[in-house]
Amino acid sequence: MLKAIIVDNEEPAVHVLRILLEKTGQVTVLGGFLSGADALDGMQFLNPDVAFLDIEMPEINGLELAEKFLVFNPDLEIIFVTAYNQYALNAFRVNALDYLLKPLLLEDVEQTVARLMKRKGFSSAPPHHFLNGRVYCFGKLSVYGPASEEPVKWRTSKTEELFAYLLQNLEKEVPKWKICEALWPECDIEKIDIHLHTTIYKLKKVLTLAQIKFEIKFINGCYWMSLPHIYTDILVFDSIVDFNYVITEDAVEKYEKAFSLYKNDYLEDHDYLWSLSQREVYAKKYYKLATSLVKYYMKKNDHTAAERILHSILGKSHFDESIHEMLLKLYFIKKDRAAFVTHYQSMQELFKTELGIEPSDAIRSLYNSMLCI
């Protein structure tokens, strides 16, 4: 098992990389540091095999920090993690083993870990994040065993809901009373224990029959669930979008992957009241990602790609006037009068019929400008 430290001044980035490294099953993270100074202090009592360093940090950047680390331990492996690939050449001048470009994907991290294992003389196990099955949460909850093309069949709707609830709180201790309040809010308090214990039993049975490895523990009045080495669409999505990012030509493919994962809203096909706040969180992440992609493609004059993404957003948010306006501006820039007028008229009818309002003054002004071309 490789021992690692992570240094990045953005806490979400440390959290995401820690998850991805530990998902490989071959790395244990000894510590995550938010500054170079703290990391240097930590190096006096830690003995890592590898340091994952962000380059853009205040006070002392990753390149300078790497040189100081190598004074402590000349055998330390250095891997840089950054959103800016212009540093690649300098990175390898300090003998870095590898260079990971944000946003990170699990497969990128696995390739780097495989190189590390080989360099350190460890036997490298094959990537196994698919070996324990797959879980999809965008839209309808779908769970697949490791060797199955058919989703698992839940014995009861409450068994499915309990799995979804524990999945949302994966590897967190959740008080028993919170689970009961979420799943059986109006149930007789004397019967709740029976309902919960019965449903836990059924959940374990379903996962066992599906050959999905799991742990469900009861600790200090709390339930805790783990699903080691399982693929989840939300984890991949989060690993890409959960830090401040800049879409570049090198990274756009990863952002497109995250965009494609968001097929529908989080647990959209399920009316779980407890999931609504998380659904809103993911909806905001998706909106930020999608609009950032549109702006990137507009700067590249790739109007086809920008239009594709705008239509996808409108498929989920029919009444988002700002997105309608962005699409109309795109048609205006392209001087595509037919597409502009067609979309304007359909939007106008939609707003009038469903909301009883007219398009904004800005959109009407844009429409008049198009007619004058």
Image (cartoon, rainbow, N blue to C red):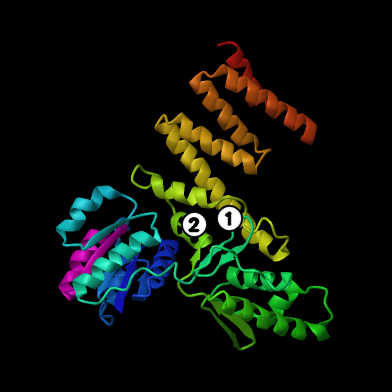
From the viewer's perspective, is 91 left or right of 353?
left
* Residue positioned 63% across, 26% down in the render: 343
From the viewer's perspective, is 363 left or right of 53?
right
Looking at the rendered image, the quarter that the C terminus falls into is top right
Residue picked out by circle 2? 237
**Whole-percent x and y of residue 114?**
28, 68
Question: Of helix, strand and loop, which one carries label 1?
Answer: helix
What residue type is disc 2 on? Phe
* Residue positioned 62% across, 62% down in the render: 141
Question: Of helix, strand and loop, which one carries label 2?
Answer: helix
- Asked if the residue under mark 2 is in contact with the one under mark 1, i.e. CB atoms within 8 Å, the reply is yes
Residue picked out by circle 1? 282
Q: In the figure, 214 relative to 310: above or below?
A: below
Q: Residue 187 falls in which quadrant of the image?
A: bottom right
Q: Is residue 222 visible?
A: yes
The region drawn magenta spans 58-81
What residue type is disc 1 on? Tyr
Judge depth for marks 1 and 2 and give the one in front.
2
* Observer-nearest of 137 and 325: 137
- First along the sequence among labels 1 and 2: 2
Per the model, the C-alpha gap separating discs 1 and 2 is 9 Å
* Observer-nearest of 36 and 321: 321
